[in-house]
Amino acid sequence: MDGCGRPAFTKPILASGFPINIIGMIIIAVSWGFFEGFSYAVISNCINKRFPSKNFWLDWGAIICGIFCILMHGAVGLAPSALMDALCTFILIYGMLVVYDYTGNAWGCVFIYFVYWNAIA
């Protein structure tokens, strides 16, 4: 992993020639989006089954996954940009998982990671 949470092979793929860099980035985006999006949905679902909440907005699985994502992607710091990054990451994960709990459709989690997360990384 580099400092931004990207795998170490992203830079060499981007530096390679035309067909290789496009194919490589598609493989990275699809695999990252699929596995990380579904992983958060499964983890949140397991936590919510273990610790159910009667309040719609108090979703323990989404809260724990949001905090875990902030810690895992290294968005911790006291600089204003780090605090804003941590807040945006938490809102993204929390919102993604609350929508998943409401709809029961985890493909939205994959779509968020495929489009948004890979775009900012």
Image: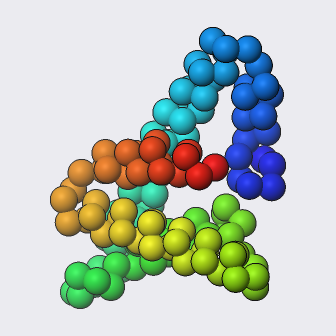
Q: Nearer the viewer, residue 54 or 14?
A: 14
Q: Is residue 13 left or right of residue 101?
A: right
Q: How is the image coloured?
A: rainbow
Q: Quadrant of residue 100?
A: bottom left
Residue 60 in the image: x percent, y percent?
40, 79
Residue 46 in sight in this render: no
The residue shown at (78%, 34%) is: 11
Q: Can you name the residue that lies furthest to the left here?
A: 103
The residue shown at (80%, 55%) is: 3
Position above or below: 55 against 48: below
Position above or below: 68 against 31: below
Q: Quadrant of residue 70?
A: bottom right
Number of numbered markers: 0
Q: Is residue 67 left or right of residue 45?
A: right
Residue 58 in the image: x percent, y percent?
33, 85
The residue shown at (53%, 51%) is: 117
Q: Nearer the viewer, residue 98 or 14?
A: 14
Residue 66 in the image: x percent, y percent?
51, 71
The residue shown at (68%, 70%) is: 75
Position above or below: 69 against 20: below
Q: Is residue 13 left or right of residue 88?
A: right
Residue 76 in sight in this render: yes
Q: Quadrant of residue 118?
A: top right
Position above or below: 55 against 87: below
